[in-house]
Structure formats: C-alpha cells, structure tokens
Image (cartoon, rainbow, N blue to C red):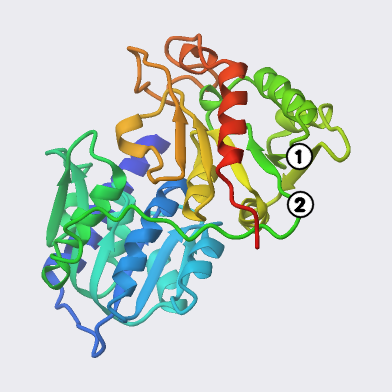
Amino acid sequence: MTSFFMQLQKFYAIYGQGLWKTKFKRKRISAEKSFLIVQLASLGDACTLVPTIKKLAENNLPIDIICSAGLEPLWSAFFPSAQVVGFASKKWSGAYVQSLVRKSLRSSYEAVFVTSIHPYAGFVASQVRAASRYGMIEGNRFYKGARVFYDKVYRAAPNEHVSKRFNGLFSLYEPFAKQFEAAAVQSLSPQKIKDRKYVLVHPGAKWPPRRWPKEFYGELLRRLANDGVFCKVLVNQAETDLYEFFKSQVQPGKIEMAHTRDLMDLMAAVAGCTVFLGNDSGPSHLANLYGKPIIVLWGPGNYERIRPLGENVSIIIKEIECRPCRQYVREKFCERGENVCLRSISVEEVHRAVREKLQTVRPAS
C-alpha cells in the first residue's frame, strides 16, 4: 500500500504540480539573465560537471546551483559567488521544494539546466520560475515522465561519456551552442606540494564490488613502505570494516590513516597529495578535478561513460565480457559473484604503476 501511495504521489507531482507549472502557468522571466543548475547526483558526476560549469561561468552571468546534500562545499569552493542549495531528501511535494528554493535562490531564471537523468531532478526544476528548462534523457527512454518538464532535451547515447552529455545539454541553449560544441575535458593546474609528499590511497567505494581487495591494498602498502614511499590511507568514518583493517597496517612515518568525516576532510586530503590511487569512485574524480596524477583500478563500472578523463589519468583495467555490470542488484557481490575484473589486477602491476607515476611528479620550486 505504501509503495502504491508513493507512486500516486509521484504521478500527481509530475503530471499535476510539475506539468501545470511548466506548461500552463505563465512564465516569469527575471530582469537579470541568470541560470540555475540542478545536479542531484553523486560526487563523481559533480566533479565531472565542474569544468563545464566553469566554461559557463566565462560568460560572467549569475549562476546558482541545487545539489545533493553534502556536496555544497565542492560547489561553493569552485563558484563562491553562486547560491548553493543542498537537497537532503526526495520529497515529491511542490511546497517542500519551493520552501527550500525560496530561502536562498532568485525569484526566477533565464534558464534551468537539469544535469541529472532522474525524474525528481526534473520535478525540482519544474518548481522554479524560469523562461526555459533543459534536461537529458538516454536515447528514447522517457524516464517516467521527466521529459514533460523540459522545453528541450539532449538525447544521450547509452555509452556516451558524461562530460560530452553535459556539453550537449548546454549547447541546447542557443547563445551557448558554439561554446559547448567541443567536450570540456579539463582540470585545475596541479598544486605544488610544499609539505612532505605522500601517495593518497583510497580503498573504498560505495558498492563493495568496485573495491580492489583490501588484502591487495595491504600488500601494496607494505611494498611502498619498503621503497620509502610515504602513504596515507583515505577511509571515511562510515567504512568501519576498512578502517579496522587498514588501522592494523599503520607504520608510523611510512603508512598513516587519513580519516574523513565529510567532504571538507576529503577535499583537504586530496588537495595535499602527490599521487592519488583508488577505485572507480567519487574521490578519484575529485583528485582528477584537482589536477592530481591519478591511478584508477577499474572494476565493473561503465568504462566508456564514467571514467575520469585527462592527461594525468592512468587506468588499470582488465577486459572482461560482463562489464558493465548491473550494479546494486546484489548488495555485496557483483552479478557474476567473483569480482574477476578487479581480482585480475595484480599487486605487482599496481606497484609498478605507482612508482612510474611518482617519477612524473615535479618537485616544488
């Protein structure tokens, strides 16, 4: 009954509140030309989107951002003049959305760009006054009614990289068409490291099958410590299983823990590292955004669509017929149940890749 009620609530939100707002109610255009970005997705997608928004900011027009709760520090760091609102829950209520929007955002916008392929993101955009709304769908899939919210949609190919999708979306707005014809693959200039250099090792991932085995990481850390390479292990406070394991690997002055509680802690740890090593996860995209030399151990994710791009990126990947895997179907195991994609990556080749990557790092002058 609860599920049925939720479906009715969504149906009413989309075809009642949302459709009424976007198609029938008179649109109000702000006197100043301003833009709203709706990005209700993960850290990885947000980091991939930042270069595109930086490109948009070159037009010197006001930009505001609605993001997933917890990601506000990222957007505020890159766009300090933007109003940033974090959404903590997905309530299909126009009153709820409008109460959050009215607290911090402008009364209306020239255009709203929805960068998340999800009906709720489209619903949020429908509750903001705007002259036009732009969104994405994948192929001809209409994503449970979200298409009705938009004046124009960008139809992304199934394996099209997300950075290209973002550029395609913004090119729908005619004044920006030429500016966004080419994909924006860029990162910040690498920061000079003044303190002691360290390799930041991130063994976690939201979905366990995306993790290279922790025992492999343990062996790698011991090898790097024997080489005289200082390593910090990045573990979130919620990853208790990983924390206990890697705490036992600590060697003072050689292997230390970088325990994070929130995004601010993560950003600080990534900003200070010399080389980043990790799985296919948000922190890898963050390190790439900061211009760090990164090594990503690729598992079941869609390589063509979501891998980090750039000249500082090295990805260790093994060809396997079951990639991309249908993720989250099983909580702790991939569909195949063996995690062959990651277990096929040896400690020896990762050790060699880290040492080679360290040789490319320029010392601070």
> Which quadrant, please, contains the N terminus?
top left
Q: Residues within 10 Å of mark 1 (few under 14, many from 20)?
A: many
Q: Are marks 1 and 2 in contact (CB under 8 Å)?
A: yes
- Which x, y percent locates residue 182? 20, 55
Q: Nearer the viewer, residue 56 or 199?
A: 199
Residue 94 appears anywhere in the view: no
Q: Residues within 10 Å of mark 2 (few under 14, many from 20)?
A: few
> For residue 64, which quarter of the picture?
bottom left
Q: Is residue 43 left or right of residue 178?
A: right
Tell me the residue that label 1 is attached to: 230
Q: From this viewpoint, is residue 298 visible?
A: yes
Instruction: Check the picture and name the quadrant holding the C terminus.
Output: bottom right
Relative to residue 183, is residue 66 drawn left or right?
Answer: right
Query: Percent position (x, y) of residue 321?
Result: 32, 12
Disc on the earlier residue, 1 or 2? 2
Residue that carries the numbered disc 2 in the rendered image: 196
Is 237 in front, or is 324? 324
Snapshot quadrant of residue 156: top left
Q: At x 46% / y 45%, what residue is drawn?
A: 312
Q: Position of residue 33 (x, y in %)?
A: 24, 83
> Compared to 119, does 150 lie above or below?
below
Q: Position of residue 194 (x, y in %)?
A: 71, 60
**For the image shown, how many numbered marks are present on the structure?**
2
Residue type highlighted by circle 2: Arg
Q: Secondary structure at mark 2?
A: loop
Task: State the mark number for residue 205.
Answer: none
- 296, above or below 178, in the image: above
Task: Name the residue nearer the viewer: 196 or 341.
Answer: 196
